[in-house]
Amino acid sequence: MKIENKSLREAYALLENATPLGCADCGLACGAVCCTDKTGDSMELFPYEKELFSSLDGFEVVDGEVPLVKCNGSCSREQRPLACRIYPLFPLVVNEDGEDKIRVIYDPRASHACPLASERVRLDRRFLRAVRRAGKYLLKDSQTADYLKKTSEFLKELIELEYKLNS
């Protein structure tokens, strides 16, 4: 898979071998529920990924405001989209003292499917660092930075709503 965009290429490289549980394949612990969930879930594609996945066997790209990708339930680690590589986390953009910074959070959208997210399991520090560094690389490109910021605002609203509903 040839990735033209430098920020995306760097993010992919950082996350190539990083996994939430370190050396272990977290999919073995839950039966790869994130890949086999039958609820019709799909993953959002980051900017520049639509072109990559449109021509790959085993993937279906669904167009929309944000393109989505559906897979057949299994793929090689090298062909996973960025959303799968960072799952169940998200590099949230926060503005501190006028500067955009990355804070890695459990993606609240993952809590319905991923036991790691729903049970708030302590994840491998190398994975957390890789997701944070990938977020920093993605902030260097205007299109991926815009996507991160927009998604971060949505996730902040979702977290606030969940808090209010559970209070």
Image (cartoon, helix red, strand yellow):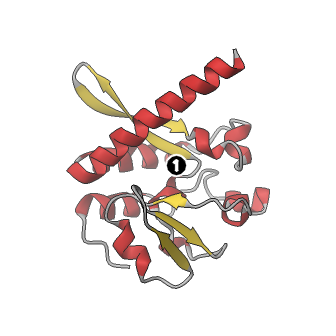
Q: Amino acid at mark 1?
A: Phe
**Name of the residue lying farthest toward the top:** 167
The quadrant where residue 112 appears: top right
**Name of the residue lying farthest toward the front:** 64
Q: Position of residue 80 (x, y in %)?
A: 51, 68
Locate the C terminus by quadrant.
Answer: top right
Which secondary structure, mark 1? helix
Q: Is residue 28 left or right of residue 129?
A: right
Q: Is residue 70 left or right of residue 9?
A: right
Identify which residue is drawn at 48% across, 29% down: 156
Camera-side residue of 149 and 76: 149
Camera-side residue of 123 and 54: 54
Identify which residue is drawn at 49% across, 35% down: 155
Identify which residue is drawn at 41% across, 56% down: 66
Q: Does the rendering let one see residue 141? A: no
Q: Position of residue 58 (x, y in %)?
A: 57, 81
